[in-house]
Amino acid sequence: MLLTEGIKQGYVIPTEYTRKLTIDGHTESYQVYKIRLDQLFYNDQNDRIATWISKYKAENHVEDMDTADKSYNDLIENFIYESNPKAIDKTKSNIELVGQREAGVVLNDGRIIDGNRRYTCLRQLHEKNSTINHFEAVILERDIQENKKEIKLLELSIQHGEEGKVDYNPIDRLVGLYNDVIKNEFITFDEYQKTVNESAASLNKKIEQAKLMVEFLEFINAPEQFYIARDLELDGPLAEVPSLLKRVKTEDEKENLKLIIFSNLAMKPQGDITRFVRKIKNVVDSNHFEEFIEEQLEYAESTLEKLEDLPEITTKEINTHLRSDEELKNQMKASVEKFEIKTKKDSTRTKPIQDLQRCQLLLSSIDYHTLSVLNDSEKELFLDQLKKCEDEIQKVKNNFEMGE
């Protein structure tokens, strides 16, 4: 353990610095230590890292990974660097220039809770300069299993506070929300909301998106392979879906619409899939919705058949084989665009009716009591405007009768 053997053997060195942390509702200043880099390891239970690991396992047919193995840290370091090389290089330059300015947080077994990016930079700098060999961090005497909830809330607090300033993939946040609040239920909705300082309405929307993400992965027969959702950049389109489903009246229509949306997400018939999903919104509110559902369900069935033919469900297989069917993609795209045009034509045709309805609504909202208190000039102006309205109504009637 770092705080016993580490200090005794000299690879953990106390510093004069402290860092304030709020744990279980209590804020305290904690001692910062310099810890030799080779005594630390990335947290495999971190949402982002766990997603990367699941991808590596799926693509390389690996069942288990040993966090004590040197190759484990090398692998995660590469994931972190490749996720945002520019940001890592910038942080690395800053550390090289002025040193590590902000302490991380680790557990007594060497597991990193906060500071993955800084630790990655220090590891890479160490390759060029062996004198750079320590990571500054608070060491918490906590166990990842016994204190799982406490550690997760601390991690969330840091991510949404300090780390929130840097890029944290929205899908990774949805994965964490799903695992912690929905699936495992070891953090309550209220605890999560308080920790991340987010409105209940916003959090409920994210919960809906997280559930849809899980349903999509089940649709493509890749249950809980969350890395696929991240690789396919589904955070944008998933954010559009809940409001779209609320426009649908029956449960059967809702389930059919979900199948259609999921098949379009899987096939990606258009470059900007978020924009493509938005196009469907207009069709849902139209008189062509049933016809649209019927046609699109055929494409959903074709998509499912193609998915069944894949040897395995990975991002590579989806991009290389599933999405290579240009004919099906073009049919799906043409279908949405066809019904979008039909809907727009309907809207254009009925616009005069809608305008008259708005006009009638405005006239009916006039407060007659206020008319009695108008002065002479205001009454004159009112009558003048009323006459203009009457004239316009007569023009509309004349044109309508001529067109019949």
Image: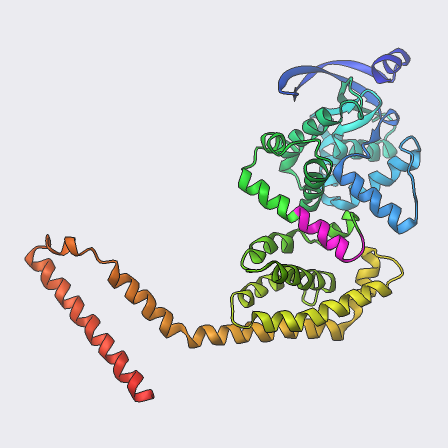
Kindly tell me whether residue 333 is visible in this rendering.
no
**In the picture, which quadrant includes the C terminus?**
bottom left
| Quarter where residue 403 is shown | bottom left
Return the residue nearer the eye: 39 or 335: 335
Looking at the image, residue 137 sits to the left or right of residue 22; the answer is right
| Quarter where residue 137 is shown | top right
Return the residue nearer the eye: 218 or 42: 218
Furthest residue in direction top, as rendered: 8
Task: State the count of labels.
Answer: 0
**In the picture, which quadrant includes the N terminus?**
top right
Q: Is residue 2 magenta?
A: no
Span colored in magenta: 210-222
Q: Is residue 398 above or below residue 167?
A: below
Magenta stretch, main secondary structure class: helix
Q: Is residue 121 above or below residue 329?
A: above
Looking at the image, residue 184 sits to the left or right of residue 196; the answer is right
Residue at image coords 80%, 26%: 145
